[in-house]
Amino acid sequence: MTLLLKNVHLIDPAASRNGRFDLIVAGGRISRIGRDLPAEGARVVELPPACVVTPGLIDIHVHLREPGQEHKETIATGTASAVAGGFTAVACMPNTDPINDHAPVTEFILKRAAEAARARVYPIGAVSIGSRGDQLTEIADLRAAGCVAITDDGRPVATALLMRRALEYAGMVGIPVIDHCEDPSLKADGVAHEGAVASLLGLRGIPGTAESIMVERDISLSEMTGGRVHIAHMSARQSLRAVRAGKDRGVAVTAEVTPHHFVLTDDALAERGGYDTNLKMNPPLREEADRAAMIEGLRDGSIDVIATDHAPHHADEKALEFDRAPFGIVGLETAVPLCLDRLVHAGVIGLPRLIELLTINAARALGLPGGTLTEGAPADLTVLVPDATVTIHAPAFRSKSKNTPFDGWTLKGAVGATIVGGRVVYVNEALVGSGLNDAS
Ligand SMILES: [Zn+2]
Ligand SMILES: [Zn+2]
């Protein structure tokens, strides 16, 4: 089936495209991008003028929970959630059960992802066996099996020596180390940001410095080894300062921020009486100065990527007291509305910059294909409807888990459709019409 998207508003920052184009998809690939292209037997689809077509969005920080925790999420439900959120590809964290610390686990994940046939899945391997922080995994084997990066996410790499070796070996096979930055002794058994709100609510605090100490250490180790380090879910203003300093002196460091860290602060905990465990995540929601710093980092380019840290948990697990509930929230189906509403419509950044943060920069951080539209490449596309109003309704999530603090929020900015390898895998007909429906 050949498809001609006629005169659509295309924004592809990496290709310097922002305007009306025709786009031809044939055999699952982008065959041509241009103006006034001849239909030549292609089925012509016109989208409503409010739609914006972008390269497929990529979320490089997702927990799919399979194998081992299928009551929270499976690769099938997680990738269905991804495409409903506009993401054509996700990179999945290794803290499954078993941990993705050897090639057969990686191969299992890729097999399940192929069976699900929704979003593309790029597995991330563990730094250490069992993510226990002592023995390095066989990084070359993980790489050969399909891992695109290594991390012990969920836990920091506690010793500088192990991080040094990880950066050296990962550097040799050309992949980055993704850094869950926290100093375990400073974080201790904290559950919320250390500050006035935690004191008021009687919650044990985690200072921003628990994060930035590790960011500083690992930027130094990246500088020493030449290996690439990617800072996951940055939340503290001190960490941003360290990233800026590292970039200024040419260190191979990139950084991501999650929507919840630039939308919310720990004030939300106080407003909800300190009981809402959907406000418990690691790193914690921080104070306004930190949130404002993340916004500034998104604006000035020192933050490279927006990633969700999609962390599904079953309702029963979150229905514990705040101290005992697990960390994390789902993010795949709320990211686009939060980003469009709070960054673009709020005037923080323009739409092309947002698309850059969600596409090409994400691809570059992990060395993934995609992130831009090139003739001959797989047709991974996202259709955004930036001016459409949506109300978040967690019970309707495709994700198996509903743990979000954003349920009931009304936001401006929606996903219209998601196309992976030329197949329409998600469509919101109310927003984009029925033209795409027969396309797959
Ligand atoms: Zn983490
Ligand atoms: Zn994570």
Image: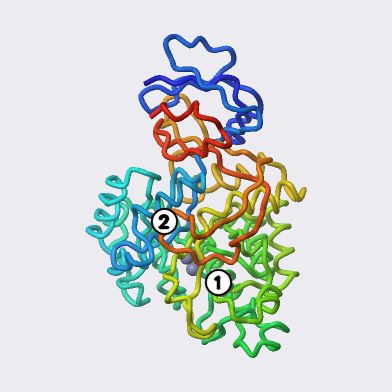
Describe residue 345's horizontal placement relative to residue 427 as left or right.
right
| Tag nearer the camera, 1 or 2 | 1
Establish if 243 lies above or below 36: below
Crowd around label 2: few <14 · some 14–19 · many ≥20 (10 Å): some
Q: Is residue 272 above or below residue 46?
A: below
- In the displayed structure, 434 sits above or below 303; it is above
Question: Image quarter for residue 254?
Answer: bottom right
How far from the left and from the top, in percent, is residue 8?
60, 25
Q: Nearer the viewer, residue 250 or 348?
A: 348
For residue 72, above or below residue 192: above
- Relative image position of residue 293 (x, y in whole percent): 72, 63
Q: Amino acid at mark 2?
A: Gly
Dot 1 falls on a residue whose secondary structure is: helix
Residue at image mark 1:
278
Q: Amino acid at mark 1?
A: Asn
Specify few, some or many for label 1: CA neighbours under 10 Å numbering under 14, 14-19, or 20 or more: many
Residue for point 37% across, 21% down:
1
Please count the marks in the image: 2
Q: Position of residue 372 (x, y in %)?
A: 52, 35
